[in-house]
Amino acid sequence: MGREIKSAPSDRAFLFLQGMATRFFERLGRALAGRGHAVYRINFNAGDRAFWRLSGAIDFSGRPEEWPEFLDRLIVDKAVSDIILFGDCRPLHRAAIRVAERRMLRIHVVEEGYLRPDWITFEEGGVNGNSALPRDPGWYSERARSLPPWSDPPSVPGSFRRRAFEDVLYTMTSMAGMWRFPHYATHRPYYQLVEYAGWLRRLALKRRAERCAAAAIEALPADPEPLFLFPLQLDCDYQVRVHSPFRAMHLAIEHVLVSFAQHAPSAARLVVKLHPLDSGLVDWAAITGHLAVDFGIADRVTVLDGGDLGRLMERRPAVVTVNSTVGSLALASGLPVIALGKAIYDIVGLTYQGELDDFWSAPTPPDAELFNAFRRVLAARCLIPGSFFNEAGLTLAVNAAVDRLEATYARPARGEAAQAAEVAAPMTAAISMR
């Protein structure tokens, strides 16, 4: 059960765009409507319709080039003040953000949490490489002075079974309703049924893979000198495709292995861990293994398909990542980290700021006090506790999101703040000339 909701008059109108295959947007929309706010939703496919059982939904069935004008008219007609969307790199969302910025609307971007588990990213303006958060360590230390001490959020682990069920429901409904949205094209690189086929194969082999991974972790030297971890990310992840120099995961793998072969100490070992949500359509283990043989480091590279990340972290590896959230987990454990792409945590004093070639010989741990300040600021500004795939987690996230949205009304949005600064600048200059 959620908290009691009392309606109140509001001049805010929230427009929801696409979300994940989860009930989070629907639950949040219901909560906002119950508090007196106007709530609307745009459906881009029949899957979107299935995950929004409230009034206020509008279908967009036009061509992509018609979308900005359609959205602009809707913003004016409905007096929209805020847009809420999942992921700011989807093509339809990139276009929507440009329209919203011209209209100086607030844009609230939802993503899976910068810190995990039990957090959801809920940030105004943009996330990840598009975040407005600075990279100045002093800024975090200063902001954290007025914040409460760090405390872990309630544990609300998401259900993989629920995640899979809702994803299949979304996909099947989208396919059944294609006639209603003839011009819609998914942002995902693979046809969904092909992904499911890969997933079924991977699930069939999962138990054996987990056993092999657990044995490989236990077989690592008790005191390696030194040990490195390279967690792979999803090839379709915009973190790799947009916010890194690689554009594809195989390029990142090759870059890391070449550098390791040429510059890491001869006693060093590298563990490459596959992403737990990878569909298995690409044989990353084989690609990594073949490259390791080509570069003469096969005896120093271990590839894991599964395995307990926490158990692996206990071996105290230094972490090489493009921009995975494993980087923030490693920082929380005091482990050295280098980020090869844009990462919210890539800050002087937290991550290694030199070149990868040098990191192998001189990995440096993060400043514990700075990381404590950093995560407290993240929790206060752009994270909410909760989970997309757990009932208690959904309730927690919705309540926190409503509080965050209503709290932002007391301060100007980024566009409004910029406009105010432009207006104030000539007035300030005139005063100073007197």
Image: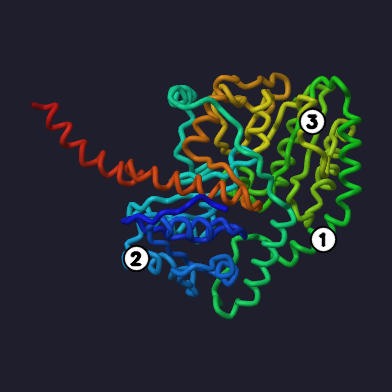
Residue found at the far bottom of this picture: 179
Figure quadrant of the C terminus: top left
Of the numbered discs in the image, which one, if any, rests on residue 261? 3
Counting residues from the N terminus, which is met first, the one under dot 2 or under dot 3?
A: 2
Q: Position of residue 90 (x, y in %)?
A: 54, 57
Q: Secondary structure at mark 3?
A: helix
Q: Is residue 71 left or right of residue 181?
A: left
Q: Position of residue 342 (x, y in %)?
A: 56, 38
Q: Label 1: which residue?
A: 200
Please say which color scheme the image uses.
Answer: rainbow
Can you tell which of label 3 and label 1 is closer to the viewer?
A: 1
**Which sits in the foreground, 200 or 280?**
200
Q: In this rendering, is residue 293 above or below 220?
A: below
Q: Label 2: which residue?
A: 78
Counting residues from the N terminus, which is met first, the one under dot 3 or under dot 1?
A: 1
Q: Report the amino acid beneath label 3.
A: Ala
Can you tell which of label 2 and label 3 is closer to the viewer?
A: 2
Task: State how far apart marks 3 and 1 are (Cα).
Answer: 35 Å
Q: In this rendering, is residue 268 above or below 380?
A: above
Q: Secondary structure at mark 1?
A: helix
